[in-house]
Amino acid sequence: MSMIRQQFDMAWKMLLPVAIGLGVVWWLFGREFDAGVWDTLRFDGRAIAGIVLAWVFMLGRDFGLTWRFRVLTDGRLSWAKAIKVCFLCEFTSCVTPTSVGGSALSMVFMHREGIEMGRATTLTMTTLFLDELFFVVSLPVVMLLVPYGELFGFGGGDKAFTVGLQTAFWIIYGVIVAWTLLLFMGIIVRPHAIRAGLVRLFSLGWLRRWRDKADSLGRDMEDTGRDLRHRPLRWWLEACGGTVLSWMSRYLVVNALFFGFAPEADQVIVLARQFVVWVILMVSPTPGGAGISEWLFTTYYGDLLLTVGMALMIALFWRIVSYYIYLVIGACMLPAWFREGIRRKNERKSNAKQFIE
C-alpha cells in the first residue's frame, strides 16, 4: 500500500507542473497567438537542424553533470550510476519548486548508489557551491559582452515588466552573491567560525526554531571544507569544467532554437538573456518553474522575434527539450527505483531478524 501511495503522490507531482505549464501556454496562445504564425513557421532544413542541435546541447548538459558526479565521487560512481543520479536529480527539479531543486536530493540518490550518506552530503554541498559560483562569476562576463540596455531592453515593450524584471534580477543576484560568500567562507576559509556564528545567530528569539538546521548546515560546511581544501588543481578544473559545460549547454538550447526558427536574432543577446532567465527562475514557486518559464520566455524574448506567436512556439519547443523530456524519463525510472528501495528495506529487515534469532 505504501508503494502505491508513493507512486500516486509522485504521479500527482508530475501532472501538476504539466497542467500548469500547458495551461499558461494555452492562455498565452488564446491571448496572443496569430494564426499567421503558421505561415512563417517552416520546418525546413534549418529548423530541423536547430531542433537537432537543441537536443545535442541537452545531451551535452547531461554529460557535464554526469562527468561532475564522476569527478566528485573520485570515480566511485560508474558512468551508468552517475547518469542515473543525474536524471533523478533533473526529474526532482521538474516536480519541486526551483527554489528547492533536484540538487537538494542528490545526496539521497548518491547514497542509494553506494555512496555513504555523510560523504554524499558533502558532495551535495560541493555541487551547490560550484553552481552558485558559476552564477556569480558569469554575470560580470555577460556584462562585458552585452550592453546593459540590450540585456534588459525590450524595444517598446512593457516598461513595468522591464523595471520589475531588473529589480527582481538584482535582488536575487544579490542573495546569490551573499549565499556564495557564506559558502566560500564556511567551506574554504573559516568553517568553524561560520558554524559558530550561525548557531549564535539562530539562537536568537524567533530564529531559535531553526537552530538545529543551522548547526547541521555548519557541520556540513566543515566536512565539505576538510574535503575540498586538500583537492589538487586538476580536480578543481574538472569539477568546474563539468559545471560550466552543463550550464552553458543548457543555455545554448535556446540559441539552437533561435538558429532554427529566428536566424535574424542576435545570438549573443539570446545567450546573455538566458543568464537572466535562470537567475529569475531560481525562486519560482511552481514545480520546475512551470507556467512562469513559458510566460517569462515569451515576454522577455518577444522583442527579438517578429511576433509573440513565434516566441510562444519557440518557448514550447524549449520546454519540451529541456523540461518535459525529464518528466518522461523520471516516470520510466521511478517504478524500478521504488521497487529497489522496497527490496533493500526488506533485506535489512530480514537480516535484522536473522541476527536477533
Image (spheres, rainbow, N blue to C red):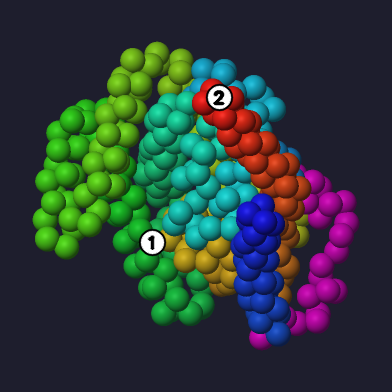
Residue 342 falls in image quadrant: top right
The residue carrying pointer 2 sits among few (fewer than 14), some (14 to 19) or many (20 or more) residues within 10 Å by Cα, namely: few
Q: Amino acid at mark 1?
A: Phe
Residue at the spot 88% in from the left edge and 56% down from the top edge: 44
Residue at the spot 56% in from the left edge and 19% down from the top edge: 76
Decide if residue 308 is in sight here. no
Residue nearer the viewer, 327 or 2: 2
Determine whether 67 is above or below 62 in the image. above
Decide if residue 220 is in sight here. yes
Determine whether 195 is above or below 26 in the image. above
Q: Is residue 50 magenta?
A: yes
Residue nearer the viewer, 195 or 10: 10
Which quadrant does the C terminus fall into?
Answer: top right
Q: Of the residues tagged 2 and 1, which is closer to the observer?
A: 2
Q: Tell me which secondary structure the magenta stretch mostly adopts.
A: helix
- The residue range painted magenta reads 31-53
Residue at the front extreme of this rendering: 357
Residue nearer the viewer, 268 or 47: 47
Residue at disc 2, secondary structure: loop
Residue at the spot 43% in from the left edge and 22% down from the top edge: 236
User: Where is mark 1, residue-wise?
Assistant: 169
Specify whether 125 is left or right of 316.
Answer: left
The x, y position of residue 133, in whole percent, is: 38, 39
Residue at the spot 66% in from the left edge and 76% down from the top edge: 23
Q: Is residue 162 magenta?
A: no
Residue at the right extreme of this rendering: 44
| Sequence order check, earlier mark of 2 and 1 | 1
Residue 354, labelled with which disc? none
Residue 357, labelled with which disc? 2
Determine whether 27 is above or below 169 in the image. below
